[in-house]
Image: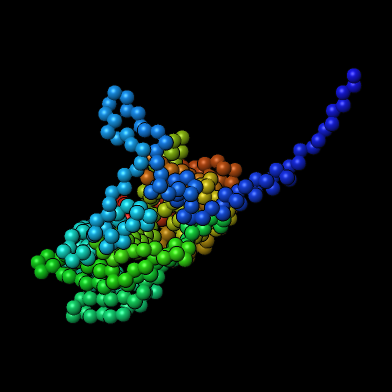
Amino acid sequence: MKLTFIHRPFNNSRSIAAVIVALSLSGCIRFDTRMQANGSFDYQDATLIEPYQTGKLSNDEARNTYVIPTLTDEQKMVGFAAGNVDVRPPTQLMAVLDGLILEKTEDGSTKIWFNAFNQQEDMQAKVWELLESYLAENNVDIAKKDKSLQQLETGIFSEKRVFGSYFNENTIIKESSYLFTIEKQQEGHSVALTVDALTYQESSDGKKLKINLVGSRKQDIELRFVNDLLAYAYHIKESDQLKQADTQPLAIKLGFDDNHQSTWIVDNEFLDTWRKLPALFTLLNFTIVEEDKNLGYFLLDYSQPDDSYWTENNLNHFELDNGEYFIQLGEVTGGTTSIAWLDEDKKPLPDQKITEIYLSITEQVRGVLLEKDKQTKEF
């Protein structure tokens, strides 16, 4: 008997198309469906298939239906409903700045205390400036402003946030307005900012959510605003401190690497050292030919300047042949960075030459120590 084998080539394009279609269909699931437990799920109508078996222990928890407690009048007034519950956890104050205190108020508004660390600081002016700067940054109009009462009322604060990807996108739009009151402590240097949400509405993909400005729901909205305000304040402080740090020269000293070769040791982390080195190379009359941050090296070209260059730039004269040189950076334990000087063949320069280049800039960096931990949390 003769057997005939028929070879059918694998249809690669058809399989790829099937995968793309499957991914596209899965991506079409809407936001509200994704948030459900398993497809179309209604917990009010759900029942347990089998009682939970506790063995020899008590069976008090064994039941075939979910127990849904009856809502109180207060819960109904807030807007809770069995099929429309805001499952987001309560908002907490994110104290990214030191000295912040959240105070409970009788009228339900949100009050945050800012405490001054420097008695010479005018905290009241700083809080005003922060608030107005944040509102301007987000294009929020000021409806009313009364400096005598230390109050400010905003227009509509609009926020739009998009979650998900191209095939599975969810758009949240929030619109709110607030009344702010600034209060200065009679004795001491503490200032309180009271946030009172006047209006608020939120929609998900065009569908308005039921939200009443009452009780904990109102305070959650106010605390979200406070957290965004504090994050803005921290970002400004961090940026200012980084700018201030960038004006400081690198603190360099002579040292040795793991192979006992002479190197420069910089009392700074790798990224900060990498960012500041180009300015130092320019000062020493080097030109950057090539650089690679991932490999941590610079390829430099050196041209010997005339005699007047050293005096004009407050540098000590050093002799170095014209040509190309490699600078290799390395991370050292303790947050410092090593700088190795290599010739065009990647051989270490003589110890004396490395020392001469270092001594040429010593007067530029002597006694300059960058402060550690520039990103403090003080306001």
Q: Is residue 51 above or below residue 220?
A: above
Q: Is residue 34 above or below residue 351?
A: below
Lateral position of residue 100 relative to residue 10, left or right? left
The percent coordinates of residue 357 (x first, y second) are 45, 51
Which one is in front, 180 or 346? 180
Extreme residue in the left direction = 187
The percent coordinates of residue 74 (x first, y second) are 23, 59
Q: Is residue 363 above or below residue 59?
A: below
Which one is in front, 172 or 318? 172
Q: Is residue 16 above or below residue 226?
A: above
Q: Check the picture and name the quadrant holding the C terminus.
A: bottom left
What's the residue at 39%, 74% (across, down)? 139
Residue 314 placement: quadrant = bottom left
Q: Check the picture and name the quadrant holding the N terminus.
A: top right
What's the residue at 26%, 29% (across, down)? 58
Lateral position of residue 102 relative to residue 54, left or right? left
Q: Is residue 281 visible?
A: no
Label tally? 0
Which one is in front, 50 or 176? 50
The percent coordinates of residue 350 (x first, y second) are 49, 42
The percent coordinates of residue 89 (x first, y second) are 32, 52
The coloring applied to the image is rainbow
What's the residue at 28%, 60% (across, down)? 76
Q: Is residue 1 visible?
A: yes
Lateral position of residue 342 relative to residue 365, left or right? right
Which one is in front, 334 or 16? 16
What's the residue at 46%, 55% (across, down)? 32
Extreme residue in the top direction = 1
